[in-house]
Structure formats: structure tokens, C-alpha cells
Image (cartoon, rainbow, N blue to C red):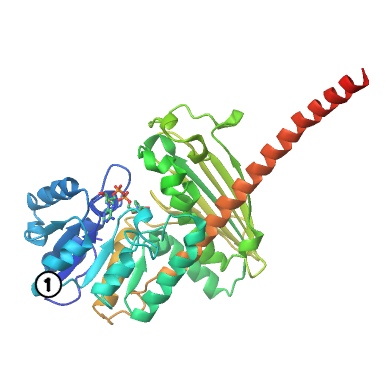
Amino acid sequence: MDKTTHVGGTDDFNVVFIGAGNIMFGSDEGPWNHSFRFEHKLGLRLKVVAIVDPAVERANAVLKKKRDSFVVSAYQNTRVFKTLDDFVKNMTPKERPRAFVVGSPPMFRGTLQPGRDIEIQIMKHFPGVAMFIEKPAATGPKSEIEQAFNIARRISDSNSICSVGYMLRYLKAVQKMKQIIEENGLVVMATIARYAAAYEAITKPDWWDKSKSAGPIIEQGTHFCDLSRYFGGEVDISSVTAHSLEWDEEAGHLSKLRIDESKIAPENRIPRVTAATWKYDSGAVGSLTHVATLQGRNYSCELEVHADGYCLKLVNPYVQPVLHVRKPGDDYEQTFTFPDDDPFFSEISNWIDIIEDIEEDPEAAQILSTYEDACRTYEFTWAIREASERSRATTLATRRPATSVVEEVLAEEENEA
Ligand SMILES: NC(=O)c1ccc[n+]([C@@H]2O[C@H](COP(=O)([O-])OP(=O)(O)OC[C@H]3O[C@@H](n4cnc5c(N)ncnc54)[C@H](O)[C@@H]3O)[C@@H](O)[C@H]2O)c1
């Protein structure tokens, strides 16, 4: 990020932040912090005209910190509103935004229903204005997925420049994998993903509650489901199978939970392990194992992509990406490292360059995750969750008849006696 040269206009770049939480202003949970990347990308041109967040105190607190810092010029005139409507009613012509960054929780977006339709509201009041929207597209019931696809169609019709925050696609390591595949005309035969979350560091109660965050695959494993699709192509949704290890099974106990799980209804508690396999439309096979088993802070995640003669293994994409490449003609792997790569900066930087229509390096500025594509990942993650729940239901059902069988035998014995 410190090596990027500033290209672009001299005019103010007005932005509205929807949500004043961790993704927007940073936290101890991880390296994400959109405001920081905007400040570096746009410098003095950045004008955050409004922050929309019903938690006004939280928004004011982050705003105060910014105003007390060297980036004060971006936040000097920022106004805080509880709702987008309040902003629309009070906006001056000078404050008209060029772009919206949507980092509110997914339960408040991705549908056509009032209060959960921020994308539609933005398009209604600011047709064609650019949107950056965080993943996942939504987290409502599965029956609402079609509404997310409907939003995708409307975004496409509106010509809004829209990007979704699947930042791992922007990693240099991931782009190197793509390059190897393209340059060698490879056909992906398998993707193998492992996502191990450090559960001890996850202290948001909502994350542990399926009725709020929709579970660890839809909320978190989604990044690796998305990367798998990025390499494997479209998934045959009907082929998805999955198993889970649940909180109430013998092997499902976690000793370092930092939240009080007893406050979450038993049916809404999340699995500790989810393992899924599926077919891609190409015939290739994919698999994902998501575990919430690590303590401490750092996650441990790996993605392997296999093709004839090749294994591309991406290790530790969140913390320090390393790529191991095995090729024909060599039994040993070549290892590539990518120091100082910041995919959070790249996704924002590319999106802004496209908004500003900077054509100096058209190769560099691409949106790698569209809203429609993100909806497909969302649909896929729901399929994994459902498959694991079906499998659990079958396990429970086969256990019950075992009891019934004993009861029947006893009843028969009583009758015979
Ligand atoms: N790409 C990544 O690696 C990454 C990392 C962290 C979070 N995220 C995503 O960002 C989103 C937000 O996560 P977070 O960690 O910042 O959550 P958070 O809980 O820290 O912050 C969310 C904020 O949104 C506010 N809010 C609630 N309802 C709202 C509404 N209707 N309109 C506007 N604001 C509203 C809340 O008051 C809160 O301040 C989630 O979708 C999450 O998955 C992505």
C-alpha cells in the first residue's frame, strides 16, 4: 500500500459509510479496516460525508478518533445518521455521494424487504452511484435467496459499479495461481479447502447464533467457498453433501468459548466442524472442511487446486500468504511468498480506479467479485449448511428408531408372556 502511486482526479471524493463497525473502522479481530484503506487511496480528496448507523454513539466515537488524528480532513464535516432516509432528507447538494460502502450486518441487507433492503434504497435515491458491499450478500432464510438474485439483476440494470468484499480473490498469490492456470491451459480437476478458525478470538455472540449470522459456513467459510468457485467454476448445487460435528455431540465440546452459549437456543447453536464435498459443472470435485477448533488468534487456512501435473497450494492467506507450486517435471514444490500484500487495499483501490475511469493500467483495475457472483457463493454456502443439517437429521432419525426397535421388542415380549 505504501508503494502505490496516486493516480486520479483532484476533486473531492464523497463517500457514505453504511455501518460504523469493525469492517469499516478496524478492531483486534483482524486486519480489516476499510476507512484506513480509503484514507490511503484518496488522501486529502476523501470526504466521508456521512456515516449511517443506528448505533449513533459508536459512530460518533469512531468519528472523534478520526478527527483527533492526521486524517481529520476526511471527517471534519462528516454527519452521523441513524438511517439512509435521514441522510437523504438532510443531504446538501455538495454532499451528494460518489460512492457507498455498505458494511452493515448482512441480516439488514440482501433482500427486498423494508429495513433489509439497503441496496435497493441506495439505488432508488442515488441511481447509478457506485456501491461496495461486504460479504456475505445476505444471511436470511434460504427462501430469500431469490431476492438477492433479484437485487443482482437490478444492480446490473442500473449500471452501478458494484464490488463485493471477497478480498481473497485480490491476493497476489491467488492471481499468481490464476496466471499459472491460464498460461498453461490447465483444467482444474479438484479444489481442496481447509478453513480452521481460531474460535477463542470470536467474541461476537451473533456469530455463534445461526438465527443471527446463519452459521460459520455462510458467514465465514464463505470466503473459501468463494475462492473454491473462483478456481473450480460453477457448482452443481444439487450435488452438495456435507456432515457436521455439532455442539451436543461427544466430540463437540469447546473448552475456551468466550461467549455464553447457554443464552443461544440449542437449535441455533453452530457446528464445530462442517465437511462438504460437491461437483463442479465441469465434472471437477470440490471439498471444504471448516473447523472452529483453534484457540489463540491466528487462523489456519489452506486451499489446494489440482490439475493434470499441477498442485497449487495456497497457505495462510489471511496472515502471510505462501504459494507452493508443484509442476510437471519436478517432484519438489517451488515456494513463492508475497510480502506486504494487502488485498483489502487492492479491492478498494481497483473499485475506486474503475469509478474514476482510470485507464492507465486497465489490467490492474478489475472488479473480481460482482454482486451476482457473490449471490452464487451465498447460494452455495446455504446448500452446504442445508446438506449438513439433512445429514444430522438423518443421524438423529436413525438413532431414534433404534430406541423404538428396543421398545417394540419389549412390547412383543410382554405380549408373549
Ligand atoms: N471481508 C472480511 O474479511 C470481513 C471482515 C469483517 C467483517 N466483514 C463483514 O462486514 C460486515 C459487518 O461486520 P462487522 O464485523 O463490521 O460488524 P460489527 O457488528 O462490528 O459492525 C456492524 C455495524 O453496523 C451497524 N448497523 C446495524 N444495523 C445497521 C443498519 N441497518 N444500517 C447501518 N448500520 C447498521 C451496527 O450498529 C454496527 O455498528 C459483515 O457482513 C461481515 O461479514 C467482512
**Label 1 crowd (10 A; few <14 / some 14-19 / many >=20):** some
Label 1 beta carbon less than 8 Å to ligand 1: no
Q: Is residue 94 visible?
A: yes
Q: Nearer the viewer, residue 155 or 112?
A: 112
> Could you tell me which secondary element the residue under label 1 belongs to?
loop
Measured as percent of width and height from the top left, residue 393 is found at 65, 43
Is residue 265 shown above or below 239? above
Q: Which residue is mark 1?
A: 12
Measured as percent of width and height from the top left, residue 80 is found at 14, 56
- Residue lying at the far front in this picture: please name it: 415
Name the image quarter holding residue 38: bottom left
- Residue lying at the far top in this picture: please name it: 417
Q: Is residue 370 visible?
A: no
**Residue at (16% x, 46% y) in the render:** 57
Measured as percent of width and height from the top left, residue 408 is found at 82, 28
Instruction: Answer with left or right where residue 195 lies relative to residue 160.
Output: right
Question: Label 1 sits on what residue type?
Answer: Asp
